[in-house]
Amino acid sequence: MNLFYPSKIFITEESCADKHALRMLARMPNVPVEIIPDEKSVIRQTFGQEDAFTIGKRMVLLTRHRGKFFKPCPSVKEYVCCNYQIFHLAVGCNFDCTYCILQAYLNNPILTFYTNLDEALAELESILGSRPDQQFRIGTGELTDSLSTDHLTGFSEVLIPFFKRIQNATLEFKTKSNNISNLLTHDPAGKIIVGWSFNTEKVYREEEHKTASLTERLEAAKQVLAAGYKVSFHFDPIIHYEGWEQDYYAAIDRIFDTIPSEKITFISLGALRFMPKLKEVVKERFPKSKIVYGEFVRGLVEKFSVEHWSPAQIKLSVAV
């Protein structure tokens, strides 16, 4: 996998003095930088261009986050909640997966890193400290890939020491990359999980553009496991196509041939589902993709899901 570097950086005036912004700029010394009053005009201008998300993935915006950093994973009353908690430090992704919901969900097409990291950590510590008897499972990969840009953000270098001293929380980095260099310089003390999205070779090659190969992901998993991290795997989305079942069995065997099953913290499953408007986005941005042409039904929360089966009906032996 090739490491990502942007073609241009936008930074808001208020972020220019933030130490985490300066650290990120130092890691991109040859990239042109433009200081802007605020992010609104740049986002609006980018959205006004054809295929805004392709353009936005080539740029980086450094700005402060004005809302809450720590939120429950979005859930609805119709389904059982997994109680996953999200720590938002970035928005957008440099990868280009055809099925990515961010294409239809985000109102900002530019890869954005938040620079007021100290405020984020203070907010998180306050919440965790106020509920010492509750165990939290926290991830950073809801609106971005947790590690694909870590060589630029260095977020892991701040988060790992932070979570090592927190008694009632576990952090998961969820990724499709093999960008683990920063992780290998830290002792996770058993508090950090690194989770890989995993799929069949066909889905990787046809739908997961610019991501690390499956071989690279497994090699990275083997390295972080040896370095003391816990590992997990996420078959999400499971995509239906002719021969899908045997391909997914092969993918599972591939994992177990590399990582001992007893060393895997958990494996999750999720069938392909998407917001209705994502269908047109996929057809326009990825005309060769066939994933939106299957048989889908509208679910209880106005998302399309595969008609043939639900995650509960997938009979693949993935228990570890």
Image (tube, rainbow, N blue to C red):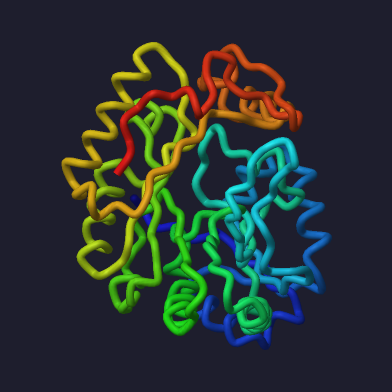
Q: Residue furthest front?
A: 133
**Total labels drawn:** 0
> Residue at position x 70%, y 29% from top?
303
Residue at point 56%, 27% (across, down): 286
Q: Quadrant of the C terminus?
A: top left
Q: Position of residue 99 (x, y in %)?
A: 56, 33
In-image side of 195 versus 217 (left or right): right
Residue at horizontal 82 percent and vertical 61 percent from the top: 40
The one of 213 and 120 positioned closer to us in this rendering: 120
Left or right position of 202 against 13: left
Q: Position of residue 141 (x, y in %)?
A: 54, 56
Q: Is residue 165 left or right of residue 37?
A: left
- What is the quadrant of residue 100 in the picture? top right
Q: Where residue 316 sits in the image (x, y, percent)? A: 35, 27
Q: Quadrant of residue 278?
A: top right
Residue lying at the far left in this picture: please name it: 257
Query: Horizontal placement of 61 versus 221: left or right?
Result: right
Residue at 54% of width from left, 68% of height from top? 135
Residue 210 placement (x, y as % from top left): 43, 43
Residue 277, above or below 41: above
For residue 86, above or below residue 256: below
